[in-house]
Each structure stands twice: as structure tokens, then as C-alpha cells.
């Protein structure tokens, strides 16, 4: 039966509709950061209150990072994401070393972080946090604060990525490796053509399981610069390198963690022991990351180093969500007009 709406009833419907729209807007304002990508439960979002609730339930995840005299308080980035990151059942070992996260800040900038470099991943020791407060009180929006300077403030999105496993490789001792991907001078390297202007370095590992082992090689950062990576921070902060062994064991190293202006880790492309002897069964070259708490990213028998540009998607996703919201609003008002 068709209903007739008097002017008073129309006003009630219009006010109710406005209340619904404003309440929806407030709910959206609480969830300020989109969370998407390689997750168990699909896309989600979080805000300051969510981080505070997580901190209350997980007090060991609460950390502080001091930047420029300002003390930020938040929860470990790894701890907050860990429970929601999906697992690739095809990977035989250390699946987490294939994961990365791209954080997009409120100014549109973004940075890629290797999950294996984050404390408490069990491998890296970087203390990156999702901050909800600083010396002045609660922040306006969650911020990713990194002690090495690779921070993104007023976050709008976190996108988790994963390097798919292509199956076991042939294995065996390597005698060369390639550098490819987002470089201007890709090529193949052997013991006879490593760049001669790179000063050999020797590092000693102080963490298990190979404490005391010493290696000689060249700076991974300088080697990648020779191969033609961009030295523009706006570019390399969005990039990572996939180190692949002959058996197809892989690990991600973000460029921000080895860039001299940021993490400045002395990661090495090692080709000999400290005494100058070959690496034996570890191949012509291997990765050595002295700061890692474990040797999971010490990829041996290196076959390739592939530089990848991580393109953040939250901006596009936000546009899509905004379009959907506008469509919903239009439909609500059309429904009101039709019934009126």
C-alpha cells in the first residue's frame, strides 16, 4: 500500500537521514588507516583507539622511539601485524622473510619495510612502531616511527606484500649471480668482474648461529648503486631487493635499511672468509647481515639480486572507497526523494 508523507514526516525522515550520514562519517573517521594486502582476514582498518586497545591487551608489544628529542609511544609494527599476516604453505622455511609492508604517510610519501628486519621477528632488530602518542599527548593519527629515520607520519595506509614461492631450485654451488630489476645497469657478476672501485670490507658476526664467523666482501648498498639503483630517497625508500639462492631460498632486504642516510646497516655481499679463503659450499657469494639476530637472511649460493619497486595501493583503494561512499549517499537521498 502506498503511503502519503506529510511535511512533518518528511522533515523527520530528512533529519534521520542526516543523522545516519553523520554517524557513518564519524565511524569512518575513527578508522584512519587502511590495512590491506597479504592478510588472513582481508582488508581492514585501524585508528588510535585500536592501537591503544592492542597495547592494553599486549603490554610486551608497547615500545618507545625517540626522534629529535620527541618520545613516541606505540606498539611494535611487527607485533601488531603478525597475527593478521597470511602464511604461504608452499614455502618450506622462513616464510616471513618473503614479506614486506609499504606504509603511506599523510603527505603522500611512502616507505617499504622488510618484515624480516623488524623486531621481534626473530631475525632483524629494527624497532619500528605504530605510534599513538608523543610528548604532547595523543597523535591526530597513527604514525609509523622508525629509529633509523625512515618514518611515515599521519598514516593513511599499510599494505602487506609477499613474494610468491616458485618452488625448489636446482641448488648447488654458485659461481656467478645477476643483478636485475629496477636498475639501470643490470648484469652478471663473477669473481673476475666485481666492480674494482668497491673497497673490500671485513665483518665479524656476533650473533648465533654463526657467532665469530668473519667474512670479506663488498657493501651491498654500494654494489647496488654501481648496478644503477636510484639514490633519490623518494625512490629507494619504496624499493627492496630479493636475494635468491640456487635452491630458490629467498629473503627480502629493504633499501631503507641499508641506505647510508637511513638504516646504514653494513650488509655485505661476501665472497671470501676474513682470511681470504673461498666460501666453499656457500658458493661464490652470499649475503651477510651482521645486525640480524639470526642468519635467516644470510642467503648462500646467491644466484640473483632483484631490485623491486613496491607500489603502494592505499591511495587508489581510498578513491574506490570514497566513490562507494558517494554512491551510498546518493542512493539514500534518492530513496528519500522517491518516498516523499
Image (cartoon, rainbow, N blue to C red):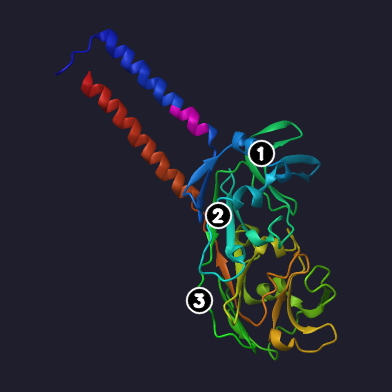
**Which residue in the protein does label 3 denote?**
167
**Residue shown at the point (39%, 21%) measured from the top left:** 18
The answer to whether residue 334 of the structure is visible from this angle is: yes
Q: Position of residue 40 (x, y in %)?
A: 50, 52
Residue occupying the far left of the picture: 1
**Residue 57: which disc?**
1
Which quadrant would the C terminus be assigned to in this image? top left
How far apart marks 2 and 3 lie (CA) works out to 21 Å
Q: Quadrant of residue 227?
A: bottom right
Q: Position of residue 184 (x, y in %)?
A: 57, 74
In this orientation, which residue lies closer to the viewer: 306 or 41? Answer: 41
Instruction: Of the two numbered discs 2 and 3 on the same chain, state the one appearing first in sequence.
Output: 2
The answer to whether residue 200 of the structure is visible from this angle is: no
Question: With respect to residue 312, does 88 lie above or below?
Answer: below
Q: Which residues are magenta?
A: 24-29
In this orientation, which residue lies closer to the viewer: 62 or 4? Answer: 62
**Residue shown at the point (37%, 18%) measured from the top left:** 16
**Residue shown at the point (26%, 9%) measured from the top left:** 7
Question: With respect to residue 339, does 105 lie above or below?
Answer: below
**Which residue in the protein does label 2 denote?**
85
Report helix, strand or loop for mark 1: helix
Instruction: Of the two numbered discs 1 and 2 on the same chain, state the one appearing first in sequence.
Output: 1
How far apart marks 1 and 2 lie (CA) works out to 19 Å
**Residue 34: which disc?**
none
Decide whether the magenta segment is chiefly helix, strand or loop. helix
Q: Position of residue 99 (x, y in %)?
A: 58, 61
Q: Quadrant of residue 302?
A: bottom right
Amino acid at each position: 500500500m502506498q503511503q502519503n508523507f506529510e511535511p512533518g514526516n518528511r522533515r523527520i525522515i530528512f533529519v534521520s537521514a542526516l543523522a545516519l550520514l553523520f554517524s557513518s562519517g564519524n565511524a569512518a573517521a575513527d578508522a584512519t588507516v587502511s590495512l590491506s594486502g597479504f592478510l588472513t582476514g582481508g582488508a581492514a582498518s585501524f585508528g588510535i583507539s585500536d592501537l591503544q586497545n592492542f597495547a592494553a591487551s599486549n603490554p610486551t608489544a608497547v615500545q618507545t622511539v625517540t626522534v629529535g628529542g620527541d618520545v613516541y609511544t606505540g606498539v611494535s609494527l611487527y607485533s601488531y601485524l603478525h597475527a593478521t599476516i597470511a602464511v604461504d604453505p608452499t614455502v618450506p622455511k622462513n616464510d616471513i622473510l618473503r614479506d614486506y609492508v609499504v606504509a603511506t604517510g599523510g603527505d603522500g610519501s611512502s616507505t617499504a619495510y622488510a618484515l624480516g628486519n623488524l623486531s621481534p621477528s626473530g631475525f632483524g632488530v629494527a624497532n619500528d612502531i605504530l605510534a599513538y602518542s608523543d610528548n604532547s599527548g595523543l597523535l591526530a593519527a597513527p604514525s609509523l616511527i622508525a629509529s633509523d629515520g625512515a618514518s611515515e607520519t599521519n598514516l593513511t595506509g599499510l599494505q602487506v606484500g609477499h613474494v610468491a614461492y616458485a618452488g625448489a631450485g636446482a641448488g648447488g654451488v654458485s659461481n656467478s649471480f645477476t643483478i636485475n630489476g629496477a636498475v639501470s645497469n643490470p648484469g652478471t657478476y663473477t669473481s673476475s668482474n666485481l666492480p674494482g672501485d668497491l673497497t673490500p670490507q671485513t665483518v665479524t658476526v656476533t650473533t648465533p648461529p654463526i657467532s665469530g664467523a668473519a667474512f670479506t666482501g663488498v657493501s651491498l648498498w654500494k654494489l647496488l648503486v654501481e648496478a644503477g639503483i636510484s639514490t633519490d630517497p623518494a625512490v629507494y625508500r619504496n624499493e627492496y631487493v630479493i636475494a635468491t639462492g640456487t635452491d630458490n631460498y629467498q629473503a627480502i632486504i629493504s633499501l631503507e635499511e641499508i641506505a647510508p642516510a637511513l638504516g646504514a646497516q653494513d650488509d655485505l655481499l661476501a665472497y671470501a672468509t676474513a682470511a681470504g679463503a673461498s666460501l666453499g659450499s656457500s658458493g661464490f657469494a652470499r649475503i651477510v647481515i651482521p645486525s640480524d639476530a639470526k642468519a635467516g637472511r644470510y642467503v648462500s649460493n646467491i644466484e640473483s639480486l632483484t631490485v623491486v619497486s613496491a607500489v603502494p595501493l592505499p591511495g587508489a583503494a581510498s578513491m574506490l572507497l570514497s566513490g562507494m561512499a558517494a554512491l551510498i549517499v546518493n542512493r539514500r537521498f534518492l530513496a528519500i526523494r522517491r518516498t516523499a
